[in-house]
Image (cartoon, grey):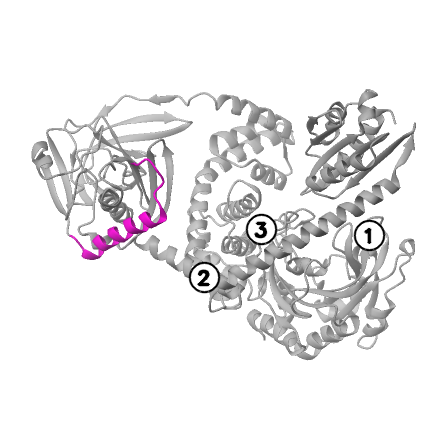
């Protein structure tokens, strides 16, 4: 039995043997096509070639393309997991011909690959062909049918309607008949009862389409008519997961080795076995499908977020977390643990997965943890709401309740709708929107803080031991409850603490308080009136028990490296820029450092590099830390220690010294500069008048950045055919691009002239005035040029209104000859009124005015409205 990787490999190698160039998959996330967020078909990366915008580098191409269908008309999200063959992310095996071979070769090679190479039983294969469309003057695709007749009996060749067997890129553009290959995977006894041909295209889970051969031979014009394409295109797409199911004798895509390794790990982590319970199986399928989508999206540069494509990915991740939480008992982040098995199985075909494995795991883990915090409480509350609604005979929960879930518990409204839908209920959408509006009004007011009284368990003061220890036995002196933004937290004061409290720009430590009974997470440590306060989400049950306070040492070490680096940066900046440099603020976190300083002009790249080199030289010297605790402040000043302007110091201070760098400081630091590893300045900017900001990273973060830079350079070289002189190659490309831009500008001028001539030709004379109206797919500048040219050419009795769309933004343009203005018409007034139809506004001079809007669909009506208002 062939593995999934062997099946994929056999496909591309078969077509390579037929003279096809193997090309890598395009990114699943699309960044340069405003009509699509994600690649949803194999042809997306070849659109420019198919549309004739760019010549084909290769006449024959083959690949395996990663695709995503979760939005628009290709929305499979709600089916995923509940059936056995829908997916969010899937692979599409494809072969293309751009003006080379056509139907005969496409069909014969498809048959050869399926039957001769993969050894699929031809008796189980069916082909559909376009039945024709008399309304469009299209006959049945007898050409394709005649080729199929060479391989299969006539009763296996099925006529298909325009919906199934005529492919179109859009309302206009390349299109043509297609021929689908279907396979009957049912047991022999079932095939004997009902012929497969009767189940083709009837949503039978075992009689499925596996390959679609598209024959692009027409161009759909704007008027709906068809004209033959000068260069015909073959575009085929085969569902990889479905092919694997057929080849491996399975009845579900999820039973193949595409998904089974992931499902097995899911079962191991969740303590369950696939195939025992339908609800559990659905959840395992959801998670197995979604982790692929999320990982590939992150690899392609799209992180989960609250906007556009990022929100789609966040929704998918949250759907997986919710299924795992509800049906697999996963209360902690676990989906990120599936990334290694995904990389193991798919990293060979898609090496970008392996290259970014760490990033993928980190992003998924953080997203899971953030969402899990909202899930437990939210789901329990929603369960009660649903039970109450059903008990009262209702089928809808109120908008107020849905908003409570969203506002108080951070529960996404679309997830509420999903869970309700699964339980036969709905939510009051309008009511929810009303509450959202109220919430925005409330958000203008500062959040009130409700602070409880201190509860004292023991008298005493806190002793900070964090310079010497990261673990220390302690006890709780006192605590209090704090409520803010509908969140309840507890502030805890310890007798001794190794936790560094946020100050001096360094973030507070996190970690745990542990005793023999329990472990309490400390999520932050802050100072209040110079008192270290440990913040937790809950109190220990045994408040009197001795506790071990344990700092998160990994975060502490990263903070220490970044803090020590700020000291070295301070000294280097004074050396390079002058002694006027003073620290004006800093932020030290485990991930990065930020250093604000006084300086009155931008620091040049050369100066930044010199600063960076000076600091790295100090790091390489591995200068040991010299620390002075409880040093009289005068002694500190005698040492030459730098104090922060405006900082209040006591009679005794702590001084941190690394060689010639000597500063007052209470933060945590490395034992020697070598532990910083290396520093890399990321940016320099202005934050206020006379204050500049440097942002930088150290240690492992620098290593990660250099890896990324190396990868980028390698990718750039690959883009320029591994040119030995990359700079020269890019310069050449820029020059060529500039030349093409000039050609394009010349072309636009020619196009403007042609459009202007057609508009004059189409002008209608009404009441003695030449009235020109049109809707054009052109940029605003081009329309403006045409309008002024028309006014310049026809100086009397002219009225022009043009609606245009560019980048999905509608524009209304009105101009007229001066005599029409004298007659009482005003272009500005006309466009302001008509612009309401495109949900916009505008204005201008009496003889020329424009209006933009949001609704392109109303453009034709707006043009007609201008003409109507003008009285023509």
Mark count: 3
Please, is residue 174 above or below residue 257 in the view?
Answer: above
Neighbour tally class for label 1: few under 14, some 14-19, many 20 plus, Cα within 10 Å: few
Earlier in the chain: of badge 3 and badge 1, it is 3
User: Residue 852 is drawn in which quadrant?
Assistant: top right
Of badges 3 and 2, the one in the foreground is 2
- Residue 414 belongs to magenta span: no
- Label 1, on which residue? 221
Quarter placement of the N terminus: bottom right
Q: What is the x, y in percent for residue 834?
A: 76, 27
Q: Earlier in the sequence, mark 1 or mark 2?
A: 1
Left or right: 472 as drawn, with respect to 291: left
Q: Which is more toward the observer, 847 or 404?
A: 847
Which is in the foreground here, disc 1 or disc 2? 2
Q: Secondary structure at mark 3?
A: loop
Q: Is residue 602 magenta?
A: yes
Mark sitting earlier along the chain (3/2): 3
């Amino acid at each position: 039995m062939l593995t999934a990787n062997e099946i994929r490999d056999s496909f591309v190698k078969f077509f390579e043997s037929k003279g096809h160039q193997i090309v890598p998959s395009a990114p699943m996330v699309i960044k340069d096509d405003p009509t699509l967020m994600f690649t949803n078909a194999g042809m997306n990366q070849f659109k420019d070639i198919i549309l004739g915008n760019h010549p084909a580098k290769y006449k024959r191409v083959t690949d395996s393309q990663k695709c995503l269908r979760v939005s628009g008309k290709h929305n499979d999200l709600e089916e995923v997991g509940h059936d056995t063959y829908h997916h969010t992310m899937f692979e599409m095996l494809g072969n293309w011909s751009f003006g080379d071979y056509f139907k005969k070769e496409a069909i014969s090679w498809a048959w050869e690959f399926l039957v001769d190479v993969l050894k699929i039983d031809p008796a189980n294969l069916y082909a559909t062909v376009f039945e024709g469309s008399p309304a469009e003057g299209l006959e049945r695709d007898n050409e394709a049918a005649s080729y199929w007749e060479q391989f299969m009996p006539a009763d296996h060749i099925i006529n298909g309607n325009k919906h199934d067997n005529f492919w179109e890129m859009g309302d206009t553009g390349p299109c043509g008949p297609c021929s689908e290959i279907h396979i009957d995977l049912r047991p022999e006894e079932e095939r004997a009862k009902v012929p497969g041909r009767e189940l083709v295209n009837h949503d039978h889970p075992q009689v499925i389409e596996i390959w679609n051969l598209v024959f692009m031979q027409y161009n759909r014009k704007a008027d709906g008519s068809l004209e033959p394409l000068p260069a015909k295109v073959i575009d085929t797409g085969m569902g990889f997961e479905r092919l694997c199911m057929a080849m491996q004798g399975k009845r579900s895509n999820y039973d193949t080795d595409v998904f089974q390794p992931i499902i097995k790990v899911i079962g191991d982590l969740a303590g369950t076995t696939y195939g025992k319970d339908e609800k559990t199986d659905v959840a395992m399928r959801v998670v197995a499908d979604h982790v692929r989508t999320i990982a590939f999206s992150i690899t392609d540069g799209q992180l989960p977020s609250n906007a556009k494509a990022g929100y789609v990915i966040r929704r998918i991740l949250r759907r997986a977390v919710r299924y795992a939480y509800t049906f697999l008992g996963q209360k902690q982040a676990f989906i990120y643990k599936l990334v290694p098995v995904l990389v193991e199985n798919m990293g060979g075909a898609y090496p970008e997965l392996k290259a970014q494995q760490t990033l993928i795991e980190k992003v998924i883990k953080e997203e899971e943890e953030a969402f899990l915090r909202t899930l437990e409480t939210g789901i329990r509350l929603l369960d009660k709401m649903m039970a109450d609604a059903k008990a009262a005979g209702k089928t809808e929960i109120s908008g107020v309740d849905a908003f409570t879930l969203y506002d108080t518990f951070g529960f996404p409204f679309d997830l509420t709708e999903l869970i309700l839908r699964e339980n036969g209920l709905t939510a009051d959408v309008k009511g929810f929107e009303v509450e959202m509006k109220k919430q925005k009004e409330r958000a203008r007011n500062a959040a009130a803080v409700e602070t409880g009284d201190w509860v004292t368990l023991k008298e005493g003061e806190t002793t900070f031991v964090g310079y010497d220890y990261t673990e220390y036995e302690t006890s709780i002196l006192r605590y209090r409850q704090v409520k803010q933004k509908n969140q309840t937290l507890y502030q805890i004061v310890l007798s001794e603490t190794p936790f560094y409290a946020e100050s001096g720009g360094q973030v507070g430590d996190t970690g745990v308080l542990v005793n023999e009974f329990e472990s309490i997470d400390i999520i932050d440590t802050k100072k209040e009136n110079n008192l270290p306060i440990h913040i937790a989400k809950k109190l220990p049950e045994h408040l009197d028990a001795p506790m071990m306070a344990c700092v998160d040492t990994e975060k502490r070490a990263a903070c220490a490296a970044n803090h020590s680096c700020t000291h070295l940066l301070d000294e280097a900046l004074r050396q390079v820029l002058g002694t006027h440099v003073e620290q004006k603020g800093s932020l030290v976190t485990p991930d990065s450092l930020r250093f604000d300083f006084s300086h009155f002009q931008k620091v040049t790249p050369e100066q930044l590099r010199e600063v960076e080199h000076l600091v790295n030289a100090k790091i390489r010297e591995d200068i040991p830390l010299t620390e002075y605790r409880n040093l009289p402040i005068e002694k500190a000043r005698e040492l030459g220690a730098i104090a922060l302007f405006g900082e209040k110091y006591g009679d005794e201070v702590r001084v941190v010294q690394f060689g010639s760098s000597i500063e007052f400081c209470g933060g945590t630091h490395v034992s020697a500069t070598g532990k910083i590893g290396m520093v890399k300045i990321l940016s320099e900017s202005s934050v206020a008048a006379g204050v500049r900001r440097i942002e930088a990273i150290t240690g492992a973060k620098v290593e990660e950045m250099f890896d990324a830079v190396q990868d980028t350079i390698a990718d750039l070289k690959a883009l320029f055919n591994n040119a030995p002189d990359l700079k020269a190659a890019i310069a050449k490309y820029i020059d060529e691009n500039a030349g093409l831009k000039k050609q394009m500008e010349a072309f636009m001028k020619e196009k403007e002239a042609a459009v202007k001539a057609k508009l004059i030709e189409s002008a209608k004379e009404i009441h003695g005035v030449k009235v020109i109206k049109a809707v054009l797919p052109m940029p605003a500048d081009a329309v403006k040029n045409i309008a002024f040219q028309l006014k310049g050419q026809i100086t009397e009795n002219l009225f022009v209104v043009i609606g245009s769309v560019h980048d999905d933004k509608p524009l209304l343009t009105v101009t007229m000859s001066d005599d029409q203005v004298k007659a009482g018409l005003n272009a500005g007034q006309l466009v302001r009124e008509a612009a309401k139809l495109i949900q916009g506004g505008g204005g201008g001079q009496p003889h020329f005015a424009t209006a933009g809007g949001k609704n392109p669909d109303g453009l034709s009506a707006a043009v007609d409205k201008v003409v109507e208002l003008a009285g023509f």
